Structures are given as structure tokens and as C-alpha cells.
Image (spheres, rainbow, N blue to C red):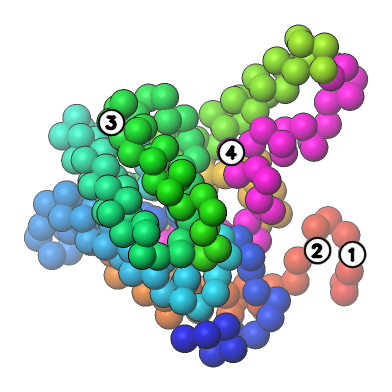
Amino acid sequence: MGKGDRAVSAPFPRHIGIIMDGNGRWAKKFLLKREAGHRAGAQTLRKLVEGMNEAGFEVLTVYAFSTENWTRDDGEVAYLMGLISEYIQQYIDEADKGNGRVRVIGDRSRLSVDLQQRIAMLEQMTADKNGILLNIAINYGGRDDIVRAVRAVAADVAAGKLALGEISERHINEYIDTAPLPDPELIIRTSGEMRLSNFLLWQAAYSEFYATPILWPDFKISHLYEAIEHYNKRQRRFGGRKGS
Ligand code: IPE
Ligand code: IPE
Ligand code: MG
């Protein structure tokens, strides 16, 4: 499928965020363990990214593990970390064949050294590709993202590079995890929940939010096109009075 075959009309969102939720409920529906839901969810992401890359999408940021997800059972946390490692490794193994780029956002210092190394390797191997950019949020929290950006700005002030009175949104934008990307125009959450759960708080200031009852493992590219159809009907006003 090429760009011209897209099922929707312009304006096309350049940056889409997805809160991949509902793996546990999907597993429950099929009387499976939560782990099976996470595995199915990881596969769903792989297929979606492949389809989006073929269709010419630019940037996808997905929420894989939040700063709050550490509070889950040790077994579930360990399984999720293992699954993330396994998928990162698969992407490494296939990196030479594909044209997709992968970046990880979030505080990776809390991840295992092995996982940190794999992430660094994958980022390096795909940095110069020209396909879709997949940002995977791992140990990511929007508040933590802002705190880390504030710290970096404060360090510039302490080093005399910046005066206190000069600090502006631009400086936070420079240090926020998704820099230098534009903010996501559209954020999708699966499984029917109507909250951000600490995802991209700074970047989501004017994102259009779309919730679908579909559980993440069942999410298909057709659902993404449905979300974009809705997005295209919205009137983004950014606080102004255009069209009203
Ligand atoms: C989303 O699925 C995956 C992660 C948060 C890691 P959940 O595990 O939250 O699934 P539900 O919400 O319990 O159905
Ligand atoms: C948000 O889902 C985090 C991810 C999808 C990685 P959660 O399932 O953790 O969020 P809550 O607990 O329903 O807010
Ligand atoms: Mg959930």
C-alpha cells in the first residue's frame, strides 16, 4: 500500500501516540494468563508498525511500560521486561533488512544493563534509516519526563549558559524526551479508558484524544484509520476562535 491508497483524507497526523492498553482484559476474555495478553500485544505492535511503515506514516510513539507499572506483581514486571528485551533483540536481528528507526523514551537508567545495551545498539543501528520512526516509551512517565527536562534546564542555568529569567517553553521543548519531534497531533487509547495515565503530559497539551473500546491485542491498522477519520473531522482551535 502506498501513500495514495490511504483510506482517509488530509490533513494527516505526522506524529501519533498510542496508549496500548487492555492486554490483561484480552487474556481474561480467552481464559488465558495476563502474560499471554502481553505477548499478543507485542505481536500487534509489530504488525501495526509494519503496516504503518508501508503506508508512509512518519512517527509513532507507543506507551509500553509506565513509571507506575513497576508496582505490578514482580512476576508480571519481570515478564514484561523479558518480553521487551526479546522484541528489541528481534528488531536488532532484522535491522539490516528494514528501513524503520527505533528510539526509546523514558528513564532507561532503571532498566537492566543488558536491556540498556540492546536499546543503545538498536538505536544506533537504525539511526540513519528513512522509514517510520517508532518511539517506544519504557519506564516512561510524563511527570518524570518534565522533571528530567527541568533538571537539564537548571543545569544550564547553573553553568551560566542561561539566565533564570530567560527560561521559556522552548527550553523545556529542547530537553523533553521526544525532542526534536513535533507534538503528537493524535493520541489513541485502547480498551475504553479515558485517561492519559502519565503519557506525554507536556507534549499532549493540544493533542486530539481518541478512545476505542478495542483491546490492544485486537487493534488493527483499520482501527487506526478509523481514529484518523475522527481526527480529520475535529476542529483544532488551539485556544483561538478560528471557524467559531
Ligand atoms: C497494557 O495492558 C500493557 C501495560 C500496561 C504494560 P494492561 O496490562 O494494562 O491490561 P489491562 O488494563 O489490565 O486489561
Ligand atoms: C498505561 O496503562 C500504561 C501503558 C499502557 C504502558 P495502565 O493500565 O498502566 O494504566 P491505568 O492503571 O489503567 O491508569
Ligand atoms: Mg491497563
Which numbered tag is attached to residue 177?
4
Alpha carbon distance from label 1 to label 3? 51 Å
* Residue where numbered disc 2 is placed: 237
Q: Secondary structure at mark 4?
A: loop
* Residue where numbered disc 1 is placed: 241
Mark 1 residue's CB less than 8 Å from ligand 2:
no
Identified by mark 1, the residue type is: Arg
- Position of residue 36 relative to residue 235, above or below, is above
Tell me if residue 205 is in the magenta stretch.
Answer: no
Residue lying at the far front in this picture: please name it.
96
Q: Are marks 2 and 1 in contact (CB under 8 Å)?
A: yes
The residue shown at (83%, 26%) is 167
- Mark 4 or mark 3: which is in front? 3
The residue shown at (89%, 69%) is 242
Tell me if residue 184 is in the magenta stretch.
Answer: yes
Identified by mark 2, the residue type is: Arg
- Which span of residues is magenta-colored? 162-190
Residue 65 in percent (x, y) is at 37, 41
Q: Nearer the viewer, residue 44 or 73?
A: 44
- Mark 2 or mark 3: which is in front? 3
